[in-house]
Amino acid sequence: MKQLTVTTLLLCVFGLTNAMQAQSTDDALYWASAKASFSQLKELLAIPNDAHFPEDIERNVQWCETQFTERGFTTRRLETPGAPLLLAEKEAEAADAKTVLIYLQVDGQPVDAEFWFQDDPYEATLKRRAPEGGWETIDWNMLDGDDIDPEWRIFARSTADSKGAVNMFLTANDIMIDRGESPNFNMKVIMDFEEEMGSPNLPQAVSKYKKALAADMLIIFDGPRHVANKPTLTFGARGISDITLQVYGALYPQHSGHYGNWAPNPAVRLSQLIASMKDERERVTIPGFYDGITLSDEVKEVLAAVPDDEEYINYKQLAIAKATGVAPTYQESLQYPSLNVRGFRSGWVGDEARTIVPSIAIAEIDIRLVLESDPDRLINLVRQHIIDQGYYVIDRKPTSRERLLHERICQFTSSTSYLAFRTPFDSEVGRWLDRALVRAFGESPIKQRTSGGSIPISPFVNELGIPAVTVPTVNRDNNQHSPNENIRIGNYVDGIKTIHYILTEEL
């Protein structure tokens, strides 16, 4: 083994010192930029963004138009039957530059203020962990100081899903403007204001505005990093279909004393029907549901490379004793379609509980689709299973005559929002993003074959014929879709850094 000379050692130490100093300078830039952007983030979060209220969505659209125009983008509304999509563009200097389409989500889930630990879910509130557990509010102005704790959180609807990413992107562009930098590719940013409604108008819009959206690749700034909270790339996402089941009993709720042993109970019947679809480990038992899903040894190696700590996931995050038996590992479980009961309602509960036999029971089901899934086939399998259980299946309320002719009646309605997509790790966009994150953080990012959630990307992939990769940035424990949604300050800063390095990576 060749011995190192004193000069070589000094050069190594000098190089390491320079690298550490550069990293320190680098981090200082992003912390300073984050501090300067917090007031803007607070302003954006203060605009209610439930897509069920068009007047609020219009305020969000106008805010985005102003912010992107101020940064040199041209903006254009892509009109749909619902909320418009907003397209912001900025061209590179080179005439032959490639084009990157960037997806950002601006709308958010509805809020139930009763379950938020602050007066207004749309008012950004700074919090830190309390000594006795939970979170305590601290003065927002502490974000102006020099001792910001990366573990502090900003609580408000859409901090993590996904206005935080919108503001990260704007802040990264501010950095480039200040430093005289510009991407060597054309940017097209498409903003979605109906994502939490399933983006019902997106597929039609992508087809209608195909020329305007034309690009070489798509990147999505959305979602949480891997549970290890390290830089992450996700190369696919599951699609989603919805099914609503309504099982009927008597015409009206009945006194449980008079008719408790006589009138059929739809809550019991619907529970039995749902239970018939799965075994005790919650694996779907409907024949053919998992057909077409084969995980090769090569794919299993890719999945095994994701550094999941399943014990931590089960015990610390979920507080469950054991995971279900759909697949032996967490990553493998995401490669299969799911059949999830997301809601069940019948009668009354709690303080409103009544001694009645309910007249109706309703279950809301979502099916998470993988690339190999045909949503129509899976929906029809579920429908046929219900028929096989002896139910008369219709897509509307039963008539009086139907109630008298059929012992078991189920109203069945369904829809598909969007399909799954998957991009190879070694695609051009995958290699490009990997280079950018290695340059930013000094190590290759965690690469996930697919995410468990669904995002409306397949219309772009299929209609435009381009590959897509998601760049998640926020903390996994962000309570997205739930009360007390939040973003970790350290993730917000890292997100700005991530996007800046991607936008300045040569393509």
Image (tube, rainbow, N blue to C red):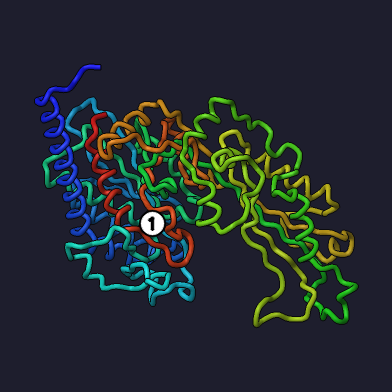
> Toward the viewer: 340 or 487?
487
SS class, disc 1 = helix
- Find residue 102 and report its horizontal and vertical position in percent: 34, 41
Left or right: residue 265 compared with residue 172: right
> Toward the viewer: 169 or 197?
169
Residue 462: tell me if it is visible. no
Give above or below for 340 relative to 54: above
Q: Quadrant of the C terminus?
A: top left
Number of numbered discs overlaid on the protein picture:
1
Q: Residue at x 49, y 31 (%)?
A: 302
Q: Residue at x 42, y 31 (%)?
A: 467
Residue 144: tell me if it is visible. yes
- Find residue 359 and report its horizontal and vertical position in percent: 77, 71
Left or right: residue 178 compared with residue 224: left
Q: Badge 1, how many Cα within 10 Å: few under 14, some, many 20+?
A: many
Query: In this figure, which residue is indicated by the disc labeled 1?
Result: 160
Q: Residue at x 83, y 79 (%)?
A: 256
Residue 503, by quadrant, is top left
Residue 244, by quadrant, is bottom right
> Toward the viewer: 343 or 279?
279
Residue 297, by quadrant, is top right
Q: Quadrant of the N terminus?
A: top left
Q: Amino acid at mark 1?
A: Ala
- Find residue 408 and report its horizontal and vertical position in percent: 84, 59
> Toward the viewer: 432 or 44?
432
Give above or below for 344 relative to 417: below
Residue sitting farthest toward the top:
1
